[in-house]
Amino acid sequence: MKTQVCIIGGGPSGLMLSQLLHLKGIDTVVLERQSREYVLSRIRAGVLEHGFAELMREAECGERMDREGEIHDGFFIAHDGKLDRVDLHKYSGGSSVVVYGQTELTRDLYEARDRMKGIVIHNAEDVQPHDLKSDTPYVTYRDGDEIVRIDCDFVIGADGFHGVSRKSIPKDVLKEYEKVYPFGWLGVLSRTKPASPELVYAKHERGFALCSLRSQILSRYYIQVPLTDSVEDWSDAAFWEELKRRLPKEIADQLVTGDSIEKSIAPLRSFVAEPMRYGNLFLAGDSAHIVPPTGARGLNSAASDIYYLYHAMLGHYQQGDSSGLDNYSAKALARVWKAQRFSWWMTTMLHTFPASSEYDQKLQEIDLAYLFSSEAAQRSLAENYVGLPF
């Protein structure tokens, strides 16, 4: 098989890049280790920044998002017995975010690739990039007993944190930065009316909590738990009881409980790999960087990678200008590190840290007090939350 761009990873990042390039006449093949059903069963983020929504529309995949997604102009932070609102629209110069589940977004991208007869190969086992420093890289994968080879110009590694792409960069070239947090998020998805029309982030002495939503009949809730906890430790009843304890009364009173559709614990970590290019391999999304979900930057950081890659590929194939490809790693990482800073700040400000001193706790209180006493501080938060310009 031969293509121009071979994309490893059939999640939203890989599918988005494939769709955008296809619309410009650039051939791609997408390889995904799991089945489509498995990919669409993963429950992930639901807050899309302004730039991501625009990219979906450019990819001709935004119709259902615009119809069913919810525009949010702000969110709440509960702290010290108060419920303060961050006015995103006011402090970001008129921007907002779209609440639309990553699962639905991925489904839209799959359907678009189907319509255009794009090549997305599922259950591709033992995927391996080769000759990445040469002008003729290729990728192999196993289909049953057969080894299939794909010759290409470029390889895109959009296969997540545990994928093969980043591991294909020699250890003496790759530098990794990591911070592991001493807690995780226990998340529950339920077919219930949301407790609030906008997201509620809650800082509480018992631990962080978040009230989120996917639609007016589908809610997503989280509580901070120790890394030693397992899903089996938490019945639905115990989860709802603990969530109510951490929410202000006016929100807890609105909480509609129900059976969980999905329940999982996600450990929190910050991670960046540099560089994001090695020869003709380009990393994108979780294969290169991960953030805690606190600031809703994960999927959105991946979108900026795709934006830069897409335009770099257009420059290369349409104008014969490879400067975008040459500058990709530096440009992507500059924005990635800003997203890292914002997610770290939100996580540090809103969570209860097991080993924190009274001094640390006092600083958390002052950080929140300052945030809601300063328009400049709220403007900085809003600017980052709706998404820095690409």
Image: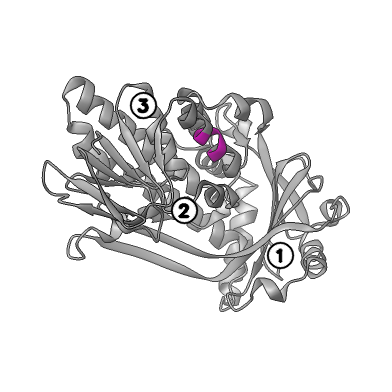
Q: Which quadrant is home to the N terminus?
A: top left
Q: Is residue 112 in sight in this rendering? A: yes
Q: Position of residue 364 (x, y in %)?
A: 60, 63
* SS at mark 2 in the image: loop
The label nearer to you, 3 versus 2, is 2
Among the 4 quarters of the image, the one containing residue 169: bottom left
Q: Tell me which residue sits at (80%, 70%) in the image.
A: 238
In space, the residues marked 1 and 2 are separated at their CA atoms by: 38 Å
Residue in front for this viewpoint, 101 or 208: 101
* SS at mark 1 in the image: loop
In space, the residues marked 3 and 2 are separated at their CA atoms by: 23 Å
Q: Which quadrant is home to the C terminus?
A: top left
Sequence-first tag of 3 and 1: 3
What amino acid type should be assigned to the residue bearing mark 3?
His
Query: Which label number is shown at residue 20?
Result: none
Q: Which residue is mark 1?
A: 204
Q: Which residue is mark 3?
A: 22
In space, the residues marked 3 and 1 are separated at their CA atoms by: 48 Å
Q: Is residue 224 above or below residue 367?
A: below
What amino acid type should be assigned to the residue bearing mark 1?
His
* SS at mark 3 in the image: helix
Q: Residue furthest right?
A: 253
Residue in front for this viewpoint, 208 or 102: 102
Among the 4 quarters of the image, the one containing residue 230: bottom right
The label nearer to you, 3 versus 1, is 3
Query: Which label number is shown at residue 34?
Result: 2
Sequence-first tag of 3 and 2: 3
Residue in front for this viewpoint, 57 or 85: 57
Q: Is residue 229 above or below residue 281?
A: below
